[in-house]
Image (cartoon, helix red, strand yellow):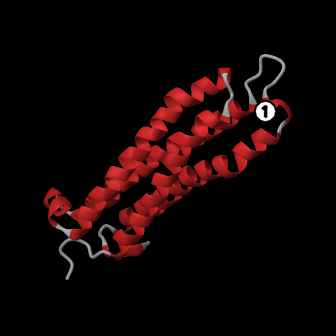
Amino acid sequence: AGNAWLLDPKVVSLAATYLHVLAMGVWLGGLLTLLLAGLPAIRALDGGGVPAGGELPALARMVNAFSRVALPAVVVLVLTGMISNALRLGSMGALFGSEYGRVLLFKLALVAAAFLLGFYNWRKVRPSLAERPDPGELRIPASLEAGLGILVLLLTAILVATPLPGSP
């Protein structure tokens, strides 16, 4: 739980931290699974998983299933991140006036970039896969989103080791 044990109210801090980690695992773990296992499996299907009838292609079904899980996870991720950061920072001044706050700002910039790529994938790429199930259309933006997610994890490791604002 890192420095979640140091914050009051502890039950809120710990719950937000654990839910945040869980939501991150669902989003990033699901995205990496889709990229590293799902896309190769689709390529291995005869005909690329394109059905003969009016059924959605396998790629579109897989991405739709991931989206149904990833969207609520991202909502939980954002909400619990806001709660955790409010408890850790204490004030807006600490966001700009502390080492912790500056690292957090960099993390938030990467989170925003990942969010924009995810939004693009959800609004543009996902619907187009129903008509044209090309894994290449998804691979680059989803890989960039996953790469940003991994960078966010690395910055989180730095944040856990960074003293909270107002700590000695």
Front residue of 82 and 100 = 100
Q: Is residue 152 visible?
A: yes
Left or right? Give the position of 90 relative to 12.
left
Answer above or below: position of 113 versus 104.
above
Q: Position of residue 40 (x, y in %)?
A: 74, 46
Q: Amino acid at mark 1?
A: Gly
Residue at image coords 70%, 43%: 39
Q: Position of residue 38 (x, y in %)?
A: 71, 45
Front residue of 43 and 8 = 43
Residue at image coords 60%, 24%: 128
Q: Position of residue 55 (x, y in %)?
A: 77, 21
Residue at image coords 39%, 64%: 155
Q: Position of residue 154 (x, y in %)?
A: 44, 66
Q: Quadrant of residue 126?
A: top right
Single out the residue that lies furthest toward the top: 54
Single out the residue that lies furthest toward the bottom: 168
Answer above or below: position of 144 versus 135.
below
Front residue of 63 and 144 = 144
Position of the C terminus, as image quadrant, is bottom left
Give the labeled residue for mark 1.
48
User: Quick one: label 1, few (<14), some, or many (20+) residues within 10 Å?
Assistant: some
Task: Give the structural element (helix, strand or loop) at label 1.
Answer: helix
Q: Quadrant of residue 116?
A: top left
Residue at image coords 49%, 61%: 21
Q: Quadrant of residue 165?
A: bottom left
